[in-house]
Amino acid sequence: MATDVFEKQTMLVLLILLPLFLGASMQRTTTPAIRHVLRGWFPNACTLVICTPPETQERHQGTTIIGLPAVQELRGEKGDSNNPEFEVLQTQIRDLQTQLDVLKAFIIKTQQVLLTPHGVIVGEKIFKTDGTRGDYNAGRATCSHMGSTLAVPRDAAENSAVQQIVIWHNANALLGINDMATESKFEDLNGNVIGYSNWAPGEPNNKGNEDCVEMHPDGKWHDRGCLLEQLIICEF
Ligand code: MAN
Ligand code: CA
């Protein structure tokens, strides 16, 4: 019985001392700013955890820059655009967009100047020649030395890009396509059957055994002998 009373008294003392102990240990381990928040029974415990507004970032994906408040936040709950900070940001974004457009146009112009008449950019591909001529094996070696491969137009846009170089040089160009393995089965340099072609009427005719392919200034393809020397165009 006496032990029971003693145990109850001990529990009571512990319950009274526990908050005091917790408060003291927080005082030691936290910064003054956090201590301010922790004072008493941690009334704002949630503010310790929420550092950024993830909900806002999800809602405005693509417009929120990490570390900066979301545009919606600056604007205010009711879409109030009178917030001066928001107005300043809007102006800055507009100015940056204008500068970006000018820069893009300049880069495109610079590329044109640097590449003409030897190369063209199409999508993520660049077709380029160093102006030399050679047969199929020489063409492969030349492109390989430049860390590239003989040109293989994969669609109409790429074909037009190669055609542009062919027109500039006024010479038929060698493509990285052949039917050496199986007659009439034209493959790229990886041995894959080509999915796009732009044969001239009557081609491929394999006249006298023609296993290689060249492009003429009209953009059309002809099968030709692999020992003929043509303009070498590579793709990067
Ligand atoms: C033309 C075209 C070619 C063909 C040669 C052969 O130039 O038809 O494709 O192979 O003649 O001389
Ligand atoms: Ca032919």
Image (tube, rainbow, N blue to C red):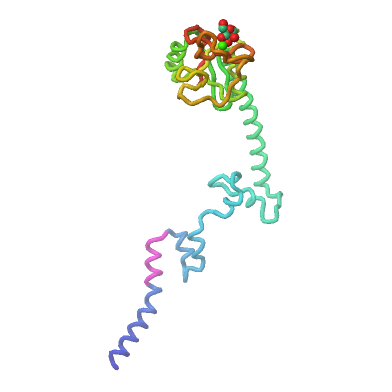
Residue 234 placed where, x, y %? Answer: 50, 17
Residue 35 placed where, x, y %? Answer: 45, 63
Residue 7 placed where, x, y %? Answer: 31, 86
**Which segment is the magenta one?**
21-30
Residue 169: tell me if it is visible: no
Residue 21, image quadrant? bottom left
Compared across the picture, whether 142 is left or right of 6 comes to right
Where in the image, quadrant-wise, is ligand 1 located? top right
Residue beneath the point at 67% across and 42% down: 90
**Count of labels in the image:** 0
Nearer-the-camera pick, 82 or 172 = 172
Residue 197: tell me if it is visible: yes
Compared across the picture, whether 233 is left or right of 105 comes to left
Q: Quadrant of the N terminus?
A: bottom left
Residue 72 placed where, x, y %? Answer: 64, 51
Residue beneath the point at 59% across and 25% down: 155
Nearer-the-camera pick, 228 or 11 = 228
Residue beneath the point at 61% across and 44% down: 63
Magenta span: predominant SS is: helix
Task: Note whether 26 is above or below 231 in the view shown.
Answer: below
- In this view, the residue farthest toward the bottom is 1
Q: Does the magenta stretch include residue 188?
A: no
